[in-house]
Amino acid sequence: MWRLLLGYVRPHRWALLAGALLSLVTGATGLLLPLVARGLIGDLAHDRSITWPLLAMAGLVVANAAVGALGSYVLRRTAESVVLGARRALSSYLLRLRITAVDRSEPGDLMARITSDTTLLREVTTDSLVALGTGGLTLVATVVLMGVVDPVLLGVTLAVIAGAGTVLGAIVPRINRASRRAQDAVGVMGASLERILGALRTVKASGAEHREERTLHEAAEESWRQSVSAAKWSAAAGNTAGLAMQIAFITVLAVGGARVATGAIDVGTLVAFLLYVFYLMSPIQQVVGAVTQYQTGAAALARIQEALRLPAEPPAGPAPLPTAGAEPATLAFTDVRFRYADDLPYVHHGVSFDIPARGMTAFVGPSGAGKTTVFSLIERFYDPGSGVITLDGCALADWDLPRLRSAIGYVEQDAPVLSGSLRDNLLLGNPEADEDAVTEVLRTTRLDGLLARLPQGLDTLVGHRGTKLSGGERQRVAIARALLRRPRLLLLDEATSQLDAVNEAALRDTVADVARSTTVLVVAHRLSTVTMADRIVVMDAGRVRAMGTHRELVDADPLYAELAATQFLATAG
Ligand code: ADP
Ligand code: MG
């Protein structure tokens, strides 16, 4: 963990050193003041002019303040830079997380790790690192001097300190544990908040505010409890150190007294040594304070490190989108077996199909058959357990990931709109799309009517997950976004399920048009969409039951015939 922290601190080590030195200088100039004051009083007593001593004093005070301010500014700035470094690293990493990792984590908790845990690094870096450095140096210097004065009494002092060290060794992990739990509770709070705010309408409609409020309060209270516990142990640690020094003082007095009596040392040595014991107090308190304070940071660091250990995709730059008129893709699944996790049942039990370039392929089958999973595998959100998926005859595993995804336009099954403006949403997948392309795609997805009604046009904000749009509008925005990428493979997962009959028919024509130059895969329920497909893949319980055209399948496959006769027709609008 130290290594992780040092990794964030290393780029700023000179600034940190400079800040620490400035702080030391402030302390030192402060120590000079009494000397100047002594000279000044002497001058007064002897009736000499005090102009120069006064000026020197004023200069010293001003310099002291300036150096002090500069020192704390440099330290604070360094700490903020460390926080920035950690936030940058974590943000980049979280964007590269594998979907499997996201499946297993709470987004709100990950958010807390970026926002709250990184903040805690601030105190650790400046205060505790600097205190540890300056306190540690003073400590070592004092101990060396004590050894020079009397090694025996040093032995006595170190024995007492070692005793206190044992007690502190038991206390410090408790601070760490409590801090960790406090931060975890903040993570739980983040997760609950994300869950509640993401579905506030449902929470209200279900009358579940009170229960959700309790969850939030419990997490907040747990964080309070653990922080208070950490404060309790920190106080214990601080006072243990103080107590140890008092005991050391008394013990040195007793042992030293005995040594003076036997003539081993003289009184002056004993007095000098006692003064050093007295001097030792402040750096020891400083070091103990730094160690206890570091525990909070260490807990935060541990949480940051955990996030940085989640499986992620390799870092890569953006890949260029297909050019206009790029060859459509071919796709093949060969005996693909897949499950979402090792402890979950298989979702695909040997799925195979071959899809030529161009044309539209419809995936049909009961809910839970594994249709969406087919699309997730094509995007390489997951890797199959066995079997091979190829795009353009090349295994997905051998594709450069950004390049693979840049070839694909994917409209997810749910909530495919992000908060922001309509323009942000449309250009998400292709920020370079020109005005003409946007206008054209708005026309083909029949969004031009909506746009004409919006006061701010493309700059209208659509709300969290597009709540200011209707379900059908959201779907058309998502389709427009995918089309703007000019994909070589277009995946539409129930992308027109919420459209009314007129819009659905129009979008069907658009998709048919796109399918002339692009390979299009759709998951669809409406018979009208399915019948116009060039081929239909019937899936059931993780297997491909049958493939063919509507006409062939009605005769050949009883499940398809039944689906066609009931579900499709019922929802055909
Ligand atoms: P379809 O799209 O055909 O309705 P899916 O491919 O979405 O079916 O899901 C197939 C099965 O996989 C379902 O039983 C579903 O519960 C399960 N499943 C889907 N996504 C996940 C996931 N992220 N983690 C675990 N199981 C999942
Ligand atoms: Mg699905």
Image (tube, rainbow, N blue to C red):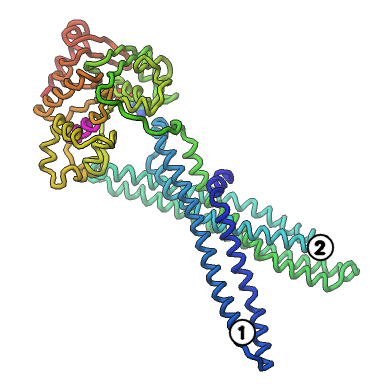
Count the numbered circles shown: 2
**Residue 473 colored magenta?**
yes
Q: Residue furthest bottom?
A: 47
Residue range (magenta): 472-481
Give the x, y percent position of residue 176. 55, 50
Query: Where, quadrant-wise, is the N terminus in this rendering?
Result: top right
Q: Position of residue 188 (x, y in %)?
A: 41, 45
Left or right of residue 229: residue 547 = left
Q: Residue type at mark 1?
A: Trp
**Quick one: label 1, few (<14), some, or many (20+) residues within 10 Å?**
few
Task: Judge: label 1 CB < 8 Å from ligand 1.
Answer: no
* Quadrant housing residue 141: bottom right
The residue furthest left is 502
What label does residue 148 carry, if any? 2
Q: Does 392 lie within the magenta span? A: no
* Residue occupying image coordinates x 16% and y 8%: 551
Of the pair 17 and 126, the residue shown nearer to us = 17
Q: Quadrant of the C terminus?
A: top left
Return the residue nearer the eye: 55 or 96: 55
Specify the label residue 52 is tagged with.
Answer: 1
Residue at image location 74% in from the left, 60% down from the top: 143
Q: Nearer the viewer, residue 46 or 356?
A: 46
Position of residue 485 relative to residue 538, above or below, is below
Left or right of 274 on screen, residue 103? left
The amino acid type of the residue labelled 2 equals Val
Residue 50 location in percent, x, y?
62, 88
For marks 2 and 1, the one nearer the N-term is: 1
- Tell whether 252 sits left or right of 186: right
Q: Main secondary structure of the magenta part?
A: helix
Q: Position of residue 233 (x, y in %)?
A: 57, 56
Residue 415 visible? The answer is no
